[in-house]
Image (cartoon, rainbow, N blue to C red):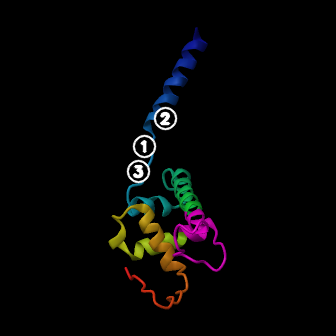
């Protein structure tokens, strides 16, 4: 009987700790991505926040790479060598803090603005007879 009560009490404590955890972050803006990626060691849920950030970087990076390889898009970020996830994270955080006007954009837009600003691609000369759009 005592064991059953002890197990029940432990289950109640564990369940209350699970409920006390904040909800998963909503990644709807560049600001939200910045909050995740700028987490400092020792801050609440540091590991979770960093994992979300690195997962976003990996996912959007793989999609970008596949789209470029398939010729579906032209490259807009061209690092001289493959940067580490930490270098990418740091570049994004630095750029986002310096460019608050973009923080309410979707996170993928802000992220790629940061990558294009950090590692711009060399300009390709326009082909004869063609016009280039400037955005």
Residue for point 48% across, 69% down: 112
Image depth: mark 1 or mark 2 in front? 1
Image depth: mark 3 or mark 2 in front? 3
Asked if residue 51 lies left or right of residue 81, the reply is left
Name the residue nearer the viewer: 11 or 69. Answer: 69
Disc 1 target residue: 23
Image depth: mark 3 or mark 1 in front? 3
Q: What x and y, as percent, mark residue 3? A: 61, 14
Disc 2 target residue: 18
Q: CA distance from mark 3 to mark 2?
A: 19 Å
Give the mark nearest the N terminus, 3 or 2: 2
> Is residue 85 within the magenta segment?
yes
Asked if residue 26 lies left or right of residue 128, the reply is left
Whether residues under marks 3 and 1 lie with C-beta atoms below 8 angstroms apart, the answer is yes
Give the mark nearest the N terminus, 1 or 2: 2
Name the residue nearer the viewer: 99 or 116. Answer: 116
Disc 3 target residue: 26
Disc 2 crowd rating (10 Å Cα; few below 14, some 14-19, many 20+) is few
Q: CA distance from mark 3 to mark 1?
A: 9 Å
As drawn, 40 above or below 13? below
Indicate the secondary structure of the residue bearing disc 3: loop
Whether residues under marks 3 and 2 lie with C-beta atoms below 8 angstroms apart, the answer is no
Q: What x and y, as percent, mark residue 50? A: 54, 57
Q: CA distance from mark 1 to mark 2?
A: 10 Å
Q: What x and y, as percent, mark residue 49? A: 51, 54
Q: Which residues are magenta?
A: 64-89
Quarter occupied by residue 122: bottom right
Disc 3 crowd rating (10 Å Cα; few below 14, some 14-19, many 20+) is few
As drawn, 76 above or below 61? below
> Is residue 30 within the magenta segment?
no
Name the residue nearer the viewer: 74 or 18. Answer: 74
Indicate the secondary structure of the residue bearing disc 2: helix
């Amino acid at each position: 009987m005592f064991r059953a009560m002890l197990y029940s009490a432990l289950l109640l404590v564990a369940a209350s700790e699970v409920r006390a955890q904040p909800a998963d972050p909503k990644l709807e803006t560049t600001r939200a991505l910045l909050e995740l990626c700028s987490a400092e060691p020792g801050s609440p849920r540091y590991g979770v926040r960093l994992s979300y950030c690195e997962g976003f970087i990996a996912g959007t990076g793989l999609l970008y790479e596949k789209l470029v390889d398939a010729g579906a898009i032209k490259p807009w970020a061209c690092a001289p060598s493959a940067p580490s996830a930490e270098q990418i994270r740091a570049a994004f955080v630095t750029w986002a803090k310096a460019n608050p006007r973009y923080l309410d954009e979707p996170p993928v837009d802000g992220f790629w603005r940061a990558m294009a600003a950090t590692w711009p691609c060399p300009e390709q000369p326009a082909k004869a007879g063609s016009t280039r759009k400037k955005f």
